[in-house]
């Protein structure tokens, strides 16, 4: 199943390692890394329980967008807006624009919150 929710889960996995200590290896705001870490923790909790809490995810992604630096803010807002609207517009699940935005936020967090510095195997 190809949905942006799965992309978001992949984002969260990368964000967790990169921001779990709230670090900032290359200029990511601490608040951004902290927000990304909280989002990843929530997704892990939801996966463990087998139940998704879209409202909680939206709250956390909104915090990511609010704390995102200017260079990635637009993509973070696209991610947030898609999460808000996917219930009434399911086409967003397969939107290349949304996928690209989530990938960009993912890449930024991975590079700027120290993901590769904290993962011994780089995965």
Image: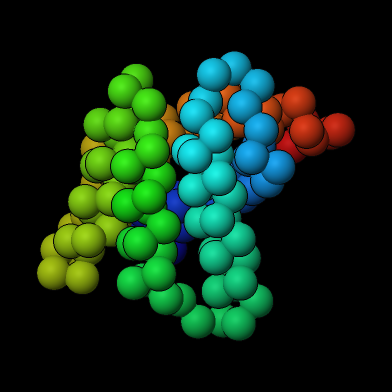
94 or 72, nearer to the observer: 72
Q: In the visual, does 78 lie left or right of 113?
A: left
Residue 55 position within the rendered picture, expressed as x and y whole percent measured from the top left: 34, 72
Residue 27 position within the rendered picture, expressed as x and y whole percent measured from the top left: 54, 19
Establish if 89 lies above or below 64: below
Q: Can residue 99 be seen in this view?
A: no
Q: In the visual, does 63 lie left or right of 33?
A: left
Quarter that holds the C terminus: top right
Can you name the residue that lies furthest to the right here? 120
Residue 47 position within the rendered picture, expressed as x and y whole percent measured from the top left: 59, 72
Taking the spot 45% from the left edge, 52% from the top edge, the residue there is 8
Exactly how many numbered labels are in the figure? 0
Establish if 1 lies above or below 46: above
Taking the spot 55% from the left edge, 45% from the top edge, the residue there is 34
Establish if 35 lies above or below 6: above
Can you name the residue that lies furthest to the top here? 26
Q: Is residue 22 visible?
A: yes
Which quadrant holds residue 92?
bottom left
Which quadrant holds residue 38?
bottom right
Quarter that holds the N terminus: bottom left
Taking the spot 55% from the left edge, 74% from the top edge, the residue there is 46
Can you name the residue that lies furthest to the left here? 88
54 or 60, nearer to the observer: 60
8 or 77, nearer to the observer: 77
Q: In the visual, does 30 lie left or right of 62?
A: right
Color style of the picture: rainbow
Residue 98 position within the rendered picture, expressed as x and y whole percent measured from the top left: 28, 43
Taking the spot 64% from the left edge, 40% from the top edge, the residue there is 22
Establish if 15 lies above or below 28: below
């Amino acid at each position: 199943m190809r949905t942006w929710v799965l992309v978001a889960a992949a984002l969260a996995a990368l964000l967790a390692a990169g921001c779990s200590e709230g670090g900032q290896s290359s200029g990511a705001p601490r608040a951004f890394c902290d927000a990304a870490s909280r989002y990843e923790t929530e997704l892990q909790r939801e996966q463990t329980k087998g139940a998704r809490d879209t409202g909680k995810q939206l709250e956390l992604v909104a915090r990511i967008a609010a704390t995102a630096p200017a260079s990635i803010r637009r993509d973070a807002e696209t991610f947030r807006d898609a999460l808000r609207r996917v219930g009434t517009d399911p086409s967003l699940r397969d939107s290349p624009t949304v996928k690209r935005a989530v990938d960009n936020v993912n890449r930024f967090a991975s590079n700027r919150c120290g993901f590769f510095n904290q993962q011994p195997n780089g995965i």
